[in-house]
């Protein structure tokens, strides 16, 4: 007769002791073997995972509106300026005023302004009053086109298009490497960054280039939002308990990976330098929200197990303290 492991018995006891609904919902699932999570992926994802994503989307929507708005308004003003240069050129060379059907509204408005002001405008930067007027007009238009509600709807639609089995497989890969507390956050970050956000942004803007989310300042915004949303994943159940089902899972579903990325290797000197700098500048605690230029480096030291969530952000693990001390002692600081 096979007896349950001590860890699993303890986890089940902890589950019975938690009365907070959100914590109990997570514990009810994370004490299960991998096979159960995969088999009931739809129920798992539609339960505590969807609840977490509702919170993520609600907090992320205004940030996305701000990012898209800045991009759209800047692009519209650039089109106006380009049209103005064209209009000025036509006027100064004696051509009749043109009006191509293929022009955008902003290009056409810029062309007409440039044509009408060719005698006084030198063709350099737009005058401040004109530029300000174009910005205000485009902000008004954008507010009527993209709202926080529309963004939330687009995010939900893109999220529900993801196969729950793929979601669970991504989570299992992350949890095996980082434990539940950190792994869930990393898995959701990967799914959002590579699948949900590109789909939603293209749907909202109609611009395929929005699929390259790395060009948008969303990474440093997204991770702390996700960590707050999954904050009720209990630390007591941090260690995954596959109970021997991992071999079965691999044979049945194939090898696992963390979304589209391969496992990270040992942090480089540059990664360690960024870690050392951030620790020194922030009193030993790396804030959850960091400049986007630092994010890939901190992500790598997180994958290596050198930092973990703590009060106020991320703190060094014992392994991280040893690695950083060794790195400093080698004179690489």
Image: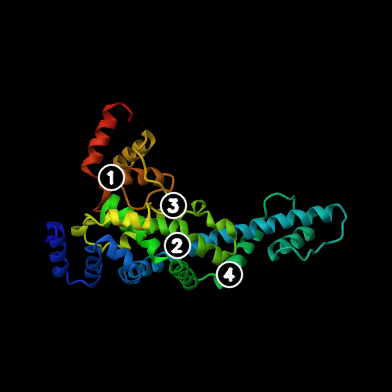
Q: Which residue is mark 2?
A: 63
Q: Residue at x 35, y 38 (%)?
A: 267
Element class at badge 2: helix
Count the numbered circles shown: 4
The residue that mark 3 highlights is: 260
Secondary structure beneath dot 4 equals: helix
Mark earlier in primary sequence (4, 3): 4
Distance CA(mark 3)–CA(mark 2): 25 Å
Q: Nearer the viewer, mark 4 or mark 3?
A: 3
Question: Label 1, on which residue?
Answer: 305
Query: Where does label 4 land, which residue?
Result: 140
Front in this rendered view, residue 227 or 24: 24
Tell me the distance, in whole angstroms, between the alpha carbons under discs 2 and 1. Answer: 30 Å
**Of the pair 131 and 53, the residue shown nearer to us:** 53
Given residues 3 and 166, the one toward you in this image is 3
Name the image quarter holding the N terminus: bottom left
């Amino acid at each position: 007769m096979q007896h349950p492991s001590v860890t699993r018995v303890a986890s089940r006891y902890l589950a019975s002791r938690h009365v907070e609904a959100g914590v109990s919902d997570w514990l009810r699932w994370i004490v299960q073997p991998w096979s159960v999570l995969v088999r009931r992926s739809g129920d798992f994802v539609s339960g505590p995972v969807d609840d977490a994503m509702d919170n993520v989307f609600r907090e992320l929507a205004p940030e996305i509106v701000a990012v898209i708005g800045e991009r759209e308004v800047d692009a519209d003003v650039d089109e106006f300026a380009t049209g103005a240069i064209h209009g000025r050129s036509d006027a100064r060379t004696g051509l009749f005023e043109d009006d191509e059907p293929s022009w955008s509204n902003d290009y056409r408005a810029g062309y007409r302004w440039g044509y009408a002001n060719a005698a006084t405008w030198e063709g350099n930067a737009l005058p401040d009053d004109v530029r300000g007027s174009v910005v205000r007009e485009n902000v008004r238009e954008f507010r009527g086109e993209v709202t926080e509600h529309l963004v939330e709807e687009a995010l939900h639609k893109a999220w529900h298009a993801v196969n729950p089995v793929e979601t669970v497989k991504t989570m299992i890969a992350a949890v095996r490497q980082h434990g539940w507390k950190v792994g869930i956050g990393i898995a959701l970050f990967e799914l959002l960054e590579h699948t949900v956000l590109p789909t939603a942004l293209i749907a909202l803007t109609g611009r395929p280039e929005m699929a390259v989310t790395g060009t948008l300042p969303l990474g440093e915004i997204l991770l702390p939002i996700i960590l707050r949303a999954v904050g009720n994943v209990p630390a007591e159940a941090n260690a995954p308990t596959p109970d021997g089902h991992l071999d079965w899972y691999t044979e049945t579903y194939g090898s696992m990976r963390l979304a589209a990325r391969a496992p990270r290797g040992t942090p480089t000197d540059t990664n360690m330098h960024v870690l050392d700098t951030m620790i020194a500048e922030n009193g030993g605690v790396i804030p959850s929200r960091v400049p986007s230029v630092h994010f890939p480096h901190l992500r790598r030291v997180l994958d290596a197990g050198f930092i973990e969530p703590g009060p106020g952000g991320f703190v060094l693990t014992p392994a991280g303290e040893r690695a950083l001390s060794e790195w400093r002692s080698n004179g690489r600081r």
